[in-house]
Amino acid sequence: MGREWECSLEAKKVKKGTTRELCKLLDILDEADQLFFWIQRANCSVDRRRGDVFSHCSGNFIQRAIEVVKPRLVITLGQSATWYFLPFAHISDVVGSRHVQKVGAVEYTLVPMFHPSKANEASRKHHEVEHKKSIAHAKEIIKQIKREAKSE
């Protein structure tokens, strides 16, 4: 359901505009595998012969994944991921904000961000202030999680 993060410093082949870039922005290059569970909502299996188009999208399992993983922070990357949590919100309107969400007994903070791909470079630049705010929100929550883990 998840994908291995390529954030370690050894992953030198990983270039700008990838998950490694996001890990650099959040200052978690060496810790991402311990801090993150990543699910790609767009991973869908489409079988038009059976008539169950998109029935195997990972989006169908996100609620259950949240209940099992119990994240404190959920970062959405891009419009599609953001729509799952904030239906019909435009990404440029919600980047820079944070939203307390709840699934069952699990409460977490949602931080929408632009996707780190090169295709979104113009949007990130045009909304640079908001983009930096989202990064700051995520970093703040990550630091809090790290502090609490150390004190346990």
Image (tube, rainbow, N blue to C red):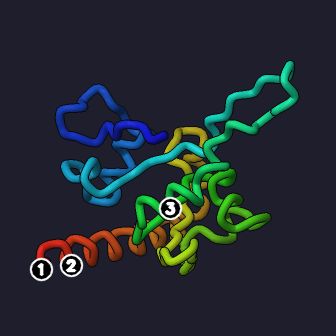
Tell me if 28 is positioned left or right of 130 in this view.
Answer: left
Residue 148 badge: 2
- Image x and y of residue 125, in percent: 55, 56
- Label 3 vs label 2, nearer the camera: 3
Against 137, residue 51 (above or below) is above
Name which quarter of the figure residue 139 lies in: bottom left
Q: Which mark is residue 151?
A: 1
CA distance separating discs 1 and 3: 24 Å
Identify the residue at image location x=67%, y=64%.
Answer: 92
Residue 97: horizontal and vertical position, in percent? 56, 76
The reply, left or right, for residue 100 in relation to residue 47 is left
- Which label is found at residue 66? 3
**Nearest to viewer (mark 1 / mark 3):** 3
Q: Nearer the viewer, residue 52 or 77?
A: 52
Could you classify mark 2 by the number of other residues whose Cα lies within 10 Å: few (under 14), some (14-19), or many (20 or more)? Answer: few
| Residue 33 image offset from top left, x and y in percent | 27, 47
| Three-letter code for the amino acid on which mark 3 is drawn | Ile
Q: Is residue 43 left or right of residue 107?
A: right
Q: Amino acid at mark 1?
A: Ser
Give the number of marks.
Answer: 3
Tag 1's secondary structure? Answer: helix
Report the amino acid beneath label 2: Glu
Is residue 46 among the parts visible in the rendering? Answer: yes
Q: Is residue 49 above or below residue 128?
A: above
- In this view, the residue in front, 14 or 6, is 6
